[in-house]
Image (spheres, grey):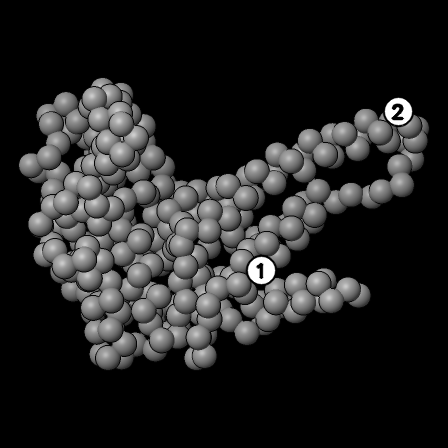
Amino acid sequence: MSEFLSSYLDRVRSIGTNYRLFFVCGAPKSGTTWLQKALDAHAQIVCAGEGHFADHFARGLSGLLGRYYDQQKVVAKNVYEGRPHYRHSPTEDYDFLVKTFILNAFARLEIPDGTRFIGDKTPANIEYLRVFRRLFPEAKIVAIVRDGRDTLVSTFRHVERVMRADGKAAESETFLVEKTRSYCERWVRSLDDAAKFAERNPGVLHTVRYEDLKQDFRGAFGAVLEFLGADVTDDEIARCEEASSFQRLSGGREAGDEDRNAFVRKGIVGDWRSSLSEQHLAVFNEVGGDWLTRLGYEA
């Protein structure tokens, strides 16, 4: 066996053997980055982001393999009269390639001594929970939920910031009005996906609310750590809270001190009340009103 292949397999094997894996997800702008930073500050945890393993790599690989297998069928029929040399197993091939790619990516992270848990935070992970469950049956899932109206505001401001940077600021308002419904639908879809997955896989997914982290970080974050199996101590939680505080992540601003040119923008609960128009609220309530009620968010 070549040195390269041996080294690759050793790296992959070490992650699968020595660490417990988890994946963080949630609708975009729900606080996934905040949660990732908090988890990554724990002495036993490495939580990286954003790998986009499922929504980009795995989805792209699925299309590539599909085209390849279609071509192999043509060759088998037209050249070898139905008796091809190769015996492909599409599902096994796909799972092997995706799983080893993810494990190798984890192995290339900076992993300090004492680490017991390794995870990836990508919001879109929530759309591929069944894939992660199949590939990593022992892995756990942490989903963060936030009032969808606040995620809508954060999405708007993020899009505006990106469009300003691209010199398209004048187009942003029209763009956002047209996209309001699709953003609301994405929030609802993420909640539907998580609820269905949790029902079918009890004990695998833990949900934490953005608002609970804001109100009682120790209680809400401590529950996440307990779910993962990591140590829950006052010192650990205090370090995680400080490392992921709005002031630290924003470069010194206090929560509520808005900077529309920053990714970490404002960091408060209920920003939608002063930021969304009646038009936006009407669309959101039509699409996501049922979930607002189910989650106990005030109208």
Rendered location of residue 110, percent (x, y): 46, 68
Q: How many marks?
A: 2
Residue 166 drawn above or below residue 154: above
Residue in the picture at 91% in, 35% down: 83
Res. 152 image quadrant: top left
Rendered location of residue 67, percent (x, y): 69, 31
Which disc number belongs to residue 133? none
Rendered location of residue 209, percent (x, y): 24, 54
**Amino acid type at mark 2:** Asn
Q: Which residue is mark 1?
A: 104
Tell me if 143 is positioned left or right of 101 in this view: left
Is residue 73 in view? yes
Residue in the picture at 61% in, 64% down: 12
Rendered location of residue 227, percent (x, y): 36, 67
**Amino acid type at mark 1:** Asn
Tell me if 42 is positioned left or right of 268 in this view: right
Which disc number belongs to residue 78? 2
In-front residue for pair 258/169: 169
Tell me if 134 is positioned left or right of 8 in this view: left
**How many residues crowd around disc 1 within 10 Å: few (fewer than 14), some, or many (20 or more)?**
many
